[in-house]
Image (tube, rainbow, N blue to C red):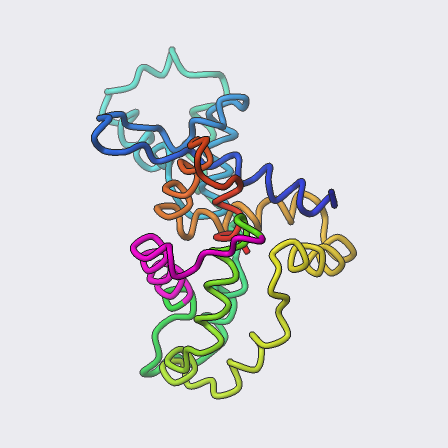
Amino acid sequence: MSEFIQLARQQCARVAPMWPLAESIAVNPCWFFTDKPVERVSAIWKYVSDIDLVMDRAFYRQQLLQGHLDEQMLPTDATKCLSEPQRLPRWFNVTDIVDQLQARQRKMLWKDEVVLQISQFCGLHTEFPERFVDESQPDNGLYRGWLTVVREDKGIATLMAESQLPDYFDPLPDDIDALFHMLADDWLRHYSEDALNYYLFALLIDVLGWSSALRYRDWDPSAPHHNIEPVLS
């Protein structure tokens, strides 16, 4: 197994499953981060997705000024930290960068379009799974089904005014393992393991609802394994 696939599966394993509503069980999305301190987990989620797990400094500074927090109970350097402006780095996916560089005018954001397209296909695949059965490779059905649909879907190119877009889907391999090996050849040569981990997790967070739903299927012994990996692909 390549290092890339190992890292991809590690990040997939970080996604908490979405349990059926009938079970009335609420699963904390940070369930599989309990091996890390809360401040580290909060920093990761803020960095990759701009999701706040804790309040920002301004909130605690206000609480301190209003007397709701006892300064004597805070760590020595906490008061100083609260008085300084909060400057946090952000991870940007390719779609985020393109959206900043391109003039949008009548086009929707690339990030919104990618999330919409993936979400719509996941819904189609969930509603009509029999249309995408790949008996020879049961773990490959979601990815291959998506690739088949997106190669024929001219709506994305029209909506985003990118007429050459369909040409980029044709060279993609039909097999998900072949895709991961192709990505590994590029990524592992040019980027650090930390950068790759952040990138993979950021992609999963962008479609967290479907990531969580498909992660649950990995807990079903009767379902094909690695259901979440095609979403990452």
Q: Where is residue 42 in the image (x, y as percent from the top left)?
A: 45, 33
| 219 w.r.t. 193: above or below | above
Q: In which quarter of the image is the N terminus?
A: top right
Observer-nearest of 205 and 84: 205
Counting the numbered discs, the total is 0
Residue 20 lies left or right of residue 136; in this view the side is: left
Task: Work out whether residue 3 can be spotted.
Answer: yes
The quadrant of the picture occupied by the C terminus is: bottom right
Residue at left offset 66%, top offset 45%: 5
- Whether residue 233 is in magenta: the answer is no
Out of 125 and 213, give the one closest to the viewer.
Answer: 125
Please check the rendered image and state whether residue 121 is part of the magenta-colored stretch, yes or no: yes
Outermost residue, right side: 189
**Closest to the observer: 89 or 10?**
10
Q: Which residue is drawn at 62% across and 59% down?
A: 175
- Counting from the top left corner in percent of width and height, residue 89 is at 53, 48
Residue 54 sits above or below residue 8 on the image: above
Q: Nearer the viewer, residue 156 or 87?
A: 156
Give the prevailing secondary structure in the magenta stretch: helix
Where in the figure is residue 205, as x and y percent of width and height? 44, 47
Q: Position of residue 60 (x, y in %)?
A: 33, 29
Residue at far top of view = 72
Q: Residue at x 50, y 75 (%)?
A: 101
Instruction: Please give the range of residues in magenta.
Output: 114-136
Going by the image, does 77 lie left or right of 60? Answer: right
